[in-house]
Image (cartoon, rainbow, N blue to C red):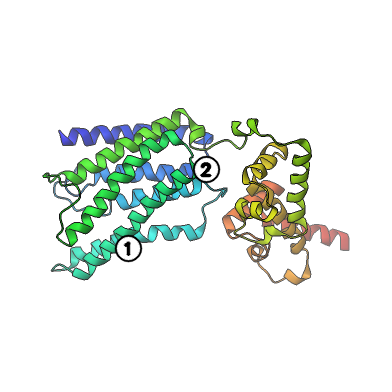
Amino acid sequence: MLKIIQIVALVQGLFLLLVFYKNKRKYRKITFWLFCGGIISVLLYIVGDDDNNLFVEDADWFFFDSSLFLTFLFLYFKYLNSDKEVFLKRDYLFFLPSISLFLSETLEIFSERENDFLEIAETLIEFVFLGYLVHILYDLLRTKRANRVLYFVVPIILIMSISYINGVFDLFEMEPIVFFDDDNFNTYLILIVAFLFYAITFYLIMKPKELIPSTKITKYKSSNLKPESIKSYKNALIQIMEKEKLYLDPRLSIHRVSKKLNIPRQYISEVLNLHMNISFQDFVNGYRIEAFVVNLQNKKYTHYTLFGIASEVGFSSKSSFNATFKKVKGLTPSQFKNSIAKKNETGTE
């Protein structure tokens, strides 16, 4: 019976992943791939559960555990509530706990006896994943985004939290919070999480704006911004970029601009998206690209690499810089540099 449930969950997950992928253009790229990573990690866990492996009896495929799913879920919500268009390199560090757990389990396999140090290390790592769960719940409650989805996410968080807490109690030989007299508890646990997670996926396929809200969402329709306020906010945004050059800060966020100008964040978002027809990230990157072009022709930066110059004007990611530059100028940075060189040669001749 259990294997039938596993197979049903697996088929359902593959189907939803396929449908989700076919509609990928509806979603913001970065959150789309993080969400897909979450689905795939759940599928891997269903297939490779240690207690009830779907294909190989008594297999120890420990690397297909819930830690990868939690990491993707954490990063998904992190980027869902941000203005970032590309994945930041520093956020790869959030995968370190999963990698550490993988290495620890590997050492245990090749160890001839139980290692208390590794057990303690794994427990500490599990506290990190518990922290991920708490942060997801806090972020959802704080932003009040996608309240209907919240009903699906909260059970996942509670179930996984109980699992990790019980693991800690077991290490210290304490009575668990919830005791199931069943060797298949871990499998039932992940199947429950899988079906809840797939329910979220199905809901978001039907209503994609709950996953990736459009830049021009209906919340602005009820705005009471007056024309003079819109004009004032536009000028303030332009001046703070041109005069104070806030775009030079690679960590610049709409929250910081809001605080600097003493203008509510939602008003800045409305002015940019509706009245200037541009996202916050594109607005900031536009100034960075123009500053890059100016510096590219400055003899001071002759010995700088292209990304070295880009770093000077606020870009923190090479891939983000290249993609943004081509989007704005229609050429890669190298092509643009070569075109300038040719113009200079022609002008000299």
The amino acid beneath tag 2 is Lys
Residue 278 visible, this angle: no
**Amino acid type, callout 1:** Ser
**Rendered residue at 20%/43% (across/down):** 187
Vertical placement of residue 192 versus 87, above or below: above
Instruction: Report crowding for label 1: few under 14, some 14 to 19, many 20 or more residues within 10 A (C-alpha).
Output: some
The image quarter containing residue 247 is: bottom right
Residue 126 lies left or right of residue 251; in this view the side is: left
On-image quarter of the C terminus: bottom right
| Residue located 41% across and 52% down the image | 135
- For the N terminus, the image quarter is top left
Task: Give the left or right position of residue 50, taking residue 234 as reference.
Answer: left
Q: Residue at x 26, y 49 (%)?
A: 162
Instruction: Name the disc covering residue 29, or none.
Output: 2
Residue 255 x/y as whole percent: 60, 52
Residue 250's quadrant in the figure?
Answer: bottom right
The x and y percentages for residue 237 are: 73, 50
Q: Secondary structure at mark 2?
A: helix
Q: Which residue is mark 1?
A: 100
User: At x 49% / y 32%, what residue is drawn?
Assistant: 208
Vertical position of residue 24 compared to residue 34: above or below = above
